[in-house]
Image (tube, grey):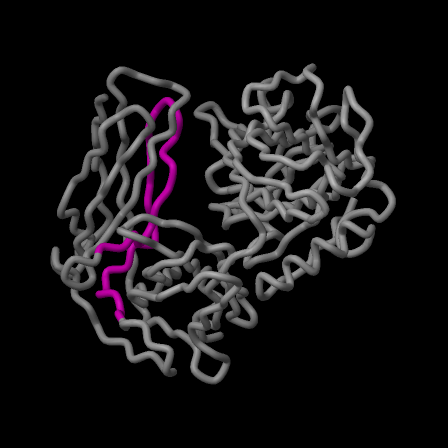
Amino acid sequence: MKSTFIRLGTASTVVAAMALAACGGGGGSPGKNSVSNPGTTPPALGGTSGTLNIALTDAPACGFDAVNVTVSKVRVHQSATAADADTGWSEVVLAPARKINLLNLTNGVLDPLGSVSVPAGRYTQVRLMLDPNTGSGFANSVTPTSTKVETTLETPAAVQAGVKITSDFEVVAGQPYNLVLDFDACRSVVTKAGGGYLLTPSVTAMAAAGSGISGYVSTLVSGSGVVVSAQRNGKVVASTTVNPTTGAFAISRLNPGAYDVVFVGSGRAAAVIGDVSVPGGASNIALGTTASPITMPASLTRSVSGAVSLLPLAPSVKPYVSASQTVVSGKTVVIQAMDAAAGTGAYTIGSLPVGAPQYAAYSATAPLVFSSAAPTQGVGNYRIDAVATGYTAKSVSPVNVLNGDQANINLQLTP
């Protein structure tokens, strides 16, 4: 079934789109989303209940043309420890279940899943329910960029029982609350050592309203698979891909504060805009216009590969590996990052520019002025970091790619 998607700009547009979905229009299949509250009768909207609108979005995916999941329902409960059979669950049921390509939900796009009247109060548990693979096995699937062939995405029994999402939001009596489920496809698909793909969902819940960053990258470079990330203190907070045709990008739902915005593309030097101040409310910060877009000079790129070993071994833990550079005094940014393979810890970080990144301090006055910023470590040098839940992070620096790819950059993590 083809899904209907809504392209969004400001946070006010997000709310309008979700309100439309609540009335049966906009995204999804109008008239086919049912709601229920097992164990109780759903209250009429009034002094003791509010409306919960739920939508799905995604961050960029790595190495896939499509990542499909089939959503059957979303359940919410006020207790973080409520079991499946307990009373008090409220849910949006998609009938029939909808197969959704998560990669169509980047750059602020939301797919409204439906709405439900819920008792007013604070909710601390969300469950995203997916259909299992049956028959041809394509309810949940991936299409690798390398093969262009749709392939089954295995869903373990724990996933089929419902993806448990940590949450903490409050529905006020007589008012709507717009909840977004951010399904990170890149971090949710694991390539199995013996072949095939496994779904290990990484999903977060957040309010739809919030500030954002948007803008344009030059169409001369937008076809280079450009990824834009908003970072704080050397860590990626959110990211998105650039529209390859128009160069447009948008990162929504950012908390107030200062961000470093990093642009990386295949065969291009990185571009960094430092200290972009995002205010509170539903504001939008524009970086680049169609007349003065962000550009990135050409650069040779290399790769760094190796393995992250865990001691003691934890086969289900996926180490996270990043390659960073210090572009100006005290300001370190991630250029590329990925999850290492569960079990083996193998990783390959590609598209690392040899050329120095371009840096511009943020100014509301366009155009921004970029200049070459040789990394503190030296041109072509990177710091490789590895982190894993329950283990102490470790780094290797400098790793120089100036003269070629670097292999056997191995790290061992201990508690």
Task: Give the answer, above or below, for where 3 lies relative to 48.
Answer: below
What residue sits 55% from the left and 72% below the top?
246
Residue 128 percent location from the top left of the image: 63, 32
The magenta stretch spans residue 267: no
The number of callouts visible is: 0
Instruction: Report whether 71 appears left or right of 148.
Output: right
In the rendered image, which quarter is residue 92 located in? top right
Residue at 23% from the left image edge and 21% from the top image edge: 415
Q: Is residue 269 visible?
A: no
Decide if residue 129 is on the left or right side of residue 345. right
Q: Quadrant of the N terminus?
A: top right
Q: Is residue 347 above or below residue 29?
A: above
Q: Which residues are magenta?
A: 332-359
Main secondary structure found in the magenta portion: strand
Q: Is residue 289 visible?
A: yes
Residue lying at 69% horizontally and 49% vertically, measured from the top left: 175
**133 sits to left or right of 384:** right
Q: Position of residue 207 (x, y in %)?
A: 56, 48
